[in-house]
Image (cartoon, coloured by chain):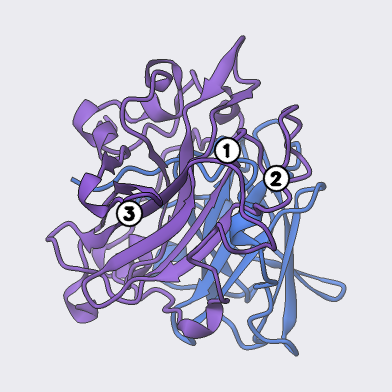
Amino acid sequence: MRTPSQTVGPFYAIGLCRSRDNELAPDGVELAGTLFDGRGEPVPDGMVEIWDAERRLWGRCGTEPDGDFSFRVPEETEHLEVYVFARGLLRHQWTRAYLREDADDELLSSLQPSERETLVARREAGGMRFDIRMQGDNATVFFAH
Amino acid sequence: MSDPTEVQVDWPDYRSTEWRAPKQPLVTLPEELHRLDGPVFGEDVLAPSDDDLTRQHEGEPLGERILVHGRVVDEDGRPLRGALVEVWQANAAGRYRHEVDRHPAPLDPNFSGAGRCLTDDEGRYSFTTIKPGAYPWGNHPNAWRPAHIHFSLFGRAFEQRLVTQMYFPGDPLFAYDPIFNAVRDPDARGLLVARFDLAATQPDWSLAYEWDVVLRRTPVEDR
């Protein structure tokens, strides 16, 4: 039997955000987003971890009071594994961010168009945007794990 | 039906889950997408006294000094070497050094409440700290969290990642805590509770608790 998960709680920053871990590539492109709850409210006490398994680059960013998080990642990144933690989340959730708008692979093509859209970052002034919605009609697709 | 030995993510007794736990069904990915390596950390992420939370300031923190130690293993009992273990906790009075914590209990100028270490070749970790206090929270009238230490762990594989909480044996608040009880299986819940470890106590110095952490099975290529 495995040790069960418990929530990261509201005070995780004292243990997990002691250093700035959100620059995977200092000269890279900005990947920013907002974490939203099911009412469309920003989540001010969430944490996002990303992992580029191919380049072995890892990052972590706690959300700001306005729910925002941001990373700097290599320009050529195709996709990143994303883990979401928060108060109210008893176990972290797994999703994936695709950084090319024309991205297509086996995983993406297995999803409905509306689901697929939630995994593809949008280009915006100064970088890329990847919002995460925990619930609702346009909720981000999360994977069983 | 969800696995009763894993935490129930959609658990209404813990009110914050209502708008945050996903309600849409999770998408099942093909097996090969689950077999990803995870990040590996080295000594460079550690600072002096990271494994001794009682020596991070000029003076000593108030409270009951304890050693917390154990092993990080996978479901097959294989030790996870070099696993990054991060901990954070309230002080002896039940107060976190965090601006959002409004509990009217004193802060301790000699306690930050955060630590880190890497497991050794047998998967062992250990921290010296003080026993955290219970504290009230707004989940329901007169809600109190049982004393706990937050743990964050990285194994070798991406899916071995775990964030959880370690509790102390015999806590009278267990029966009333919706976070602890979101794990429905009593045996699985028991895995969150440390064991008092008389053998590891240091006479005239500190008490000790032992707590092992079991992560998901290690994929063959990461062994």
Residue at the disc numbered 2: B108
Quadrant where the C terminus of chain B lies? bottom left
> Is disc 1 placed on a helix, strand or loop?
loop
Task: Residue type at mark 2: give it.
Answer: Asp
Residue B4 versus residue A95 in the image, above or below: above
Colour purple belongs to chain = B
Cβ–Cβ under 8 Å for marks 2 and 1: yes
Which is in the foreground here, disc 1 or disc 3? 3
Q: Is residue B70 left or right of residue B77?
A: right
Residue A30: percent from left, percent from top:
75, 76
Whole-percent x and y of residue B88?
55, 51
What label sits on residue B202 in the rendered view?
3
Residue position for label 1: B92
Give the farthest residue toward the top. B141
Give the mark nearer the N terminus: 3 vs 2.
2
Residue A97 visible within the image: yes
Which chain letter goes with mark 2?
A: B
